[in-house]
Image (cartoon, rainbow, N blue to C red):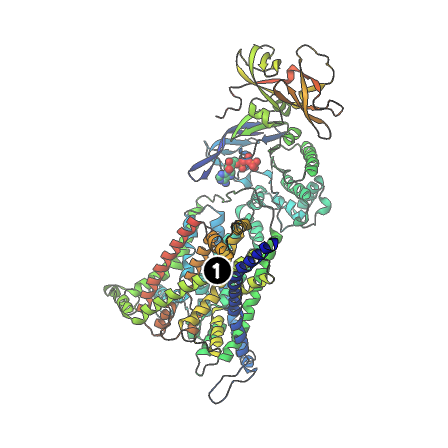
Amino acid sequence: MTIIATTAIFDSTRQRLEPQWIVIGVCIALVVWLALVPLAFLLWQSFLTPQTAAEPARFTLENYAAAYASGETARLLGNSLTFAVGAAALSFVLGTAFAWINERTNTAFKSLFLALALVPLVIPSVLFTVAWIFLASPKIGIVNLVLQSWTGSDAAFVDIYSLGGMIWVDGLHYSPMAFLLMTAAFRSMDPALEEAALMSGAGLLQVARRITFRLAWPAAVAALLILFVRAIESFEVPALLGLPAGIEVYTSAIYQAVNKYPSEVGLASAYAVVLLLITALCVYTQSRLSRHDTRFATVTGKGFRSRRVDIGRWRYLTAALFVLYFAVLVLLPFLVLLWSSLQKFYSVPSRAALATVGLDAYRNLLDHPGFAASVLNSALLSLGSATFVMLVTSVICWIVVRTRMPGRLLLDSLTSLPLAIPGLVLGLAVMVCYLKLDVGVYDTLWIMFIAYVTRFMPYGLRPTTTSMLQIHKELEESAAMSGASWATTFRRIVLPLIKPGLIAGWIYVVIVAVRELSSSILLYSPGTEVISITIWELWQNGQYVELSAAGVMLMSVLFCLVMLAQVAGRKFAIIEP
Amino acid sequence: MLSVRSLHVDYPAEGGAVNAVRDVSFDVARGTFFTLLGPSGCGKTTTLRAIAGLERPRRGEIEADGRIVYSAGKDIFLAPNRRNFGMVFQSYAIWPHMNVFKNAAFPLEVGRRRLGRKEVEAKTMRVLAAVGLDDLADRAATKLSGGQQQRLALARALAMEPTLLLLDEPLSNLDAKLRERMRFELTRLQRELGVTTVYVTHDQSEALALSHAIAVMNEGRIVQIGSPADIYQRPRDRFVADFIGSTNLLDATVIAADAQTGRCRIATALGELHARGNGLSRDEAVVLSIRPEDVELFDEPPACADGDNLCCGTVDAKVFLGDYLDFQVKVGERLLLARAHPSLRAAPGAPVHVRIKADKCIAISDRRAGSPE
Ligand SMILES: Nc1ncnc2c1ncn2[C@@H]1O[C@H](COP(=O)(O)OP(=O)(O)OP(=O)(O)O)[C@@H](O)[C@H]1O
Ligand SMILES: [Mg+2]
């Protein structure tokens, strides 16, 4: 009797375990494959000569010699570092200053600013860069024209096609990222530390200099590293602004090497490997730093206390600064695109041009068959990859948070690894990988889907983990005790409970997938263009007004999406305000 | 020295404001130790922060050392860094990026007064010596124990030679042993330096041990101000009696009251008792408060002076608490808490004689006995 009962239980547990292990196994295999295999191919490719009809590929170190032993090396490295450091520093200074004003003073209308901070981040870089070309190119830049008409001289006052111009556009565009990072840092500080300084007689600026910024130091270093990595992997700005002026950085050099005829994938891979080393080192340092900044953690004060200093009438000045910042960051680029989208041919604002305002550009664009196709492709790819990413990462996250499986921390790191892979490098790696492995995905939407899923896995993992950590294990255990199988428990208990994290991650992935360009640029083929690629092509073809029309529509849609996400976020309390 | 007049502090909250402090007024004499005492959430911290200038009140006036630092009527609000008040935060707020010396020297380096380096050093070392941290001056602030952090926070607040010292539950993060010792040191320092101090705590024994005067707060209001002895022996209402140490509270009715002597006779569940109470009238419902240590227990019938209350009961339970014994004595249907010397032998079930001096029976009029307003 007992024996029979035991066997029955044994059998039933075995049956219950099976689907669990299949799902878990498939997810792990997928992550390992996505994160590692393309990189292996990339590394391998970097040691091969170009394969031609006459000659098969063979092992060589020439790629590295060409990439790193020539006179170009120093220039490329110098340009890349100058650009990335400059842009990161600009973002950091702007973002930190505004974060401090927003968090520590009673600036007027501040709740509005925080809500607006996400908006610039969803504007595709290619659009932002083009808008700034319209604004500040030496020939047609509106800023130059305005300054010229004021001063009467015909000199070019600002030249966007320069290292300075690149730093300005990229640094400005990503300053809201610094704003969000530093806002979080300032918020996590025990307010009593600053109040104690205030009580000691220190003034507002003394407190900021001697206490706030000192304490935010580890967070600031981490933020700088993130911004640096982001800038050095930036592709659109260097390609659109740097290449015309002959300023090459790693990403644009990779692009040039691939698009050369004959294409030099080996050389591109050699560049990519070193770029990857730089970003990986930074991301690793940053994650170490974030783990160790508990050194500065102190006993936090009891309960929430507002820690905003009344700055009197200055609060309107700071509010004005914010308005100016958003004007330069969002309004000006949007308005210049709007203006040019209403023209037949690109022309600078003037009374004569005002007479020719019309909707031709929009009509042309919508008639263009490729445009509708690219919208569909973008929708398919962003929704599809977001859903897939969230499904996979929810399982991965469950394994990491809930099980004692050996190697689960490695799994966590592997899933986060794509954070350290520049988009262009990932595109290259995926391209090389599926050129060699002929499984029929090359030249289809699937190869872009693979790249997107790989690239955005980390973005899915983080909010899910946060949600999962807040759920007590006993909730699952009680479901199991009620007789639910693992799959049922996962579907009925785990997924609904981590829904806030899943929604947050999903929305985020959709948004970043729509604005993705740097991976797609190496993977698309005629028929698989996405919106950002269409914009890129319109630029290359000189169809500026159609480009502007596409930009205006895209920005409007993304703006609505962000606002929707924030409303949803407040409702489900998923995005911290 | 410090005078707070009809202070009101609100916090904005969803669906209206939280009235954290309502109509609080008190005066603190120069050089004295004044305590705000009350249960969690009653608005002590808020009051203290309003005095510090970290919170902006809605109404009222605060004057310190002859200077009005806040006045709603005259539209005066002095920024906290101009008030020259020292403050010790509950979390200590020791700056982790500075060492012990730098932490304590900070108030001397910032602000308007400019002191020479020598002078800063001398003053800092003096104040560190006063709290016994002078030999740890170069230690990283994060490498201090809880008690040392607490002393450093105190040193930092004292370094600026403040006109007023504000302390927010400075002992609550320490373990029991250390708390006892720091309590002692805090009293010594305060008495030595003669600095006027406002202290916030929810621990009544701490308040009774440290203070010259105590204000008991409840739900944003002050319910009683007085010396520790006053508060303990003559609680003004049921809330104070209950909050300040454990007490026996009995419902009773006045039989006769003598306004001259403050003596009265009341009917309780224990029988008729002599008690003390002011402004009572015949047939009035009152609450009788008797401290456990005032309930004297005897094996034999004790000597009984005029006005002593005597009754008989049985021991219900007894707990040994080291320095004393806690008894529960059943008198009639009532359980009385009594605190007696460990030498008392009575075992549970044994009869005992209970004596309560009339002076220790405090009759509190029920009209203001903890009735929520
Ligand atoms: N920033 C705030 N916003 C809204 N309400 C607050 C805020 N700070 C405190 N309160 C509320 O004000 C009331 C008084 O709070 P306060 O911190 O002064 O209490 P306390 O007496 O110091 O309590 P404790 O002993 O727990 O520290 C409480 O009801 C609290 O919830
Ligand atoms: Mg408090």
Residue that extends furthest to the front in the rendered view of this protein: A1
Image quarter of residue B154: top right
Image quarter of residue A166: bottom left
Residue B69 in picture, x, y percent from top left? 52, 34
In-image side of A382 versus B56 (left or right): left
| Chain containing the residue with disc 1 | A
Image position of B65 with respect to A572: above or below: above
- Residue drawn at x 54%, y 40% is B80
In-image side of B344 versus B157 (left or right): right
- Residue drawn at x 51%, y 86% is A56
In-image side of A331 versus B157 (left or right): left
Image position of A180 with respect to B277: above or below: below
Q: Is residue A85 visible?
A: no
Image quarter of residue A380: bottom left
Residue A453 in picture, x, y percent from top left? 46, 66
Q: Amino acid at mark 1?
A: Gly
In this rendered view, identify the residue nearer to me: A478 or A204. Answer: A478
In this rendered view, identify the residue nearer to me: A340 or A497. Answer: A497
Residue that extends furthest to the left in the rendered view of this protein: A355
Residue A430 in picture, x, y percent from top left? 48, 73
The answer to whether mark 1 is within 8 Å of ligand 1 is: no
Residue A491 in picture, x, y percent from top left? 47, 55
The residue singled out by tag 1 in the image is A460
Q: Is residue A569 visible?
A: yes
Q: Describe the element under mark 1 as helix, strand or loop.
A: helix
Q: How many marks?
A: 1
- Residue drawn at x 69%, y 42% is B128
Number of residues whose C-alpha sits closer than 10 Å to that of mark 1, classed few (under 14), some (14–19) or many (20 or more):
many
Residue that extends furthest to the right in the rendered view of this protein: B343
